[in-house]
Image (cartoon, rainbow, N blue to C red):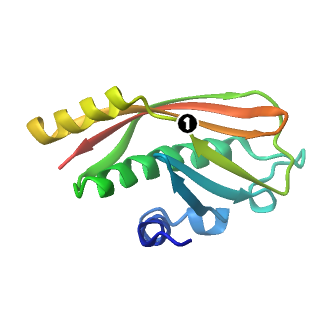
Amino acid sequence: MENPTLEVLQQTLHREMPITVPMGIEVVSWENEQLTVRMPLEPNRNLHYSAFAGSLNALCTIVGWGTVYMLLERESLAGNVVIRRGKIRYLRPVRAPEFLAVGLPIDPSESDYFFELLRSKGKSKIDLDVEIADEQGPYVRFQGSYVVQD
């Protein structure tokens, strides 16, 4: 991790969301406003030796939360980030020994509006998409709505 903000995010996740430690959640990168997080299968598997649905949901929720965290850091803003609503689709079993969850591109007009509301009202919301996929396509698609208040 060459980005010091990613190291702070990793430490924040482990401190504020302690479940991320036994789950093995590891922040990988932040490029073009897309957060990538890795998670191993073994501590997150179910009886079918595929990833437990709850772990996949938690991972995607955390990627969305981390994305908002990184957006706020970029703008030197602070706020309390919470998920307001989440929707997940499980498209096929995840059996890879480790896998990545990636925040999908954010429409610039969405992030502009998010920051405009946050600066003017002290609170805002943003909808984010996250995907877990491999070269064959998506395993999981997640949509989350996050709220920020100062």
Q: Is residue 73 left or right of residue 86?
A: left
x and y percent of residue 24 in the render?
Answer: 66, 65
Q: Mark 1 — residue?
A: 104
Q: Quadrant of residue 121?
A: top left
Q: Where residue 7 appears, x then y in whole percent?
A: 48, 72
Report the number of numbered marks. 1
Seen from the viewer's position, the closer of residues 31 and 69 is 31
Instruction: Tell me where residue 113 appears, x and y as whole percent.
Output: 25, 29
Relative to residue 103, is residue 112 depicted above or below?
above
Task: Give the residue furthest to the right.
Answer: 48
Seen from this angle, which residue lies furthest left? 120
Q: Position of residue 50 (x, y in %)?
A: 85, 46
Q: Secondary structure at mark 1?
A: loop
Badge 1, how many Cα within 10 Å: few under 14, some, many 20+? many
**Rendered residue at 64%/30% (across/down):** 141
Left or right: where 113 falls relative to 6: left
User: What residue lies at 32% left-to-right and 26% top-to-bottom?
Assistant: 109
In the rendered image, which quarter is residue 115 located in?
A: top left
Q: What residue is drawn where x is 44% and y is 48%?
A: 67
Q: Is residue 140 above or below residue 11?
A: above
Residue type, label 1: Leu
Given residues 82 and 74, the one toward you in this image is 74
Q: Is residue 28 above or below residue 54?
A: below
Image quarter hosting the N terminus: bottom right
Which residue does the image show at 27% across and 33% down from the upper left?
112
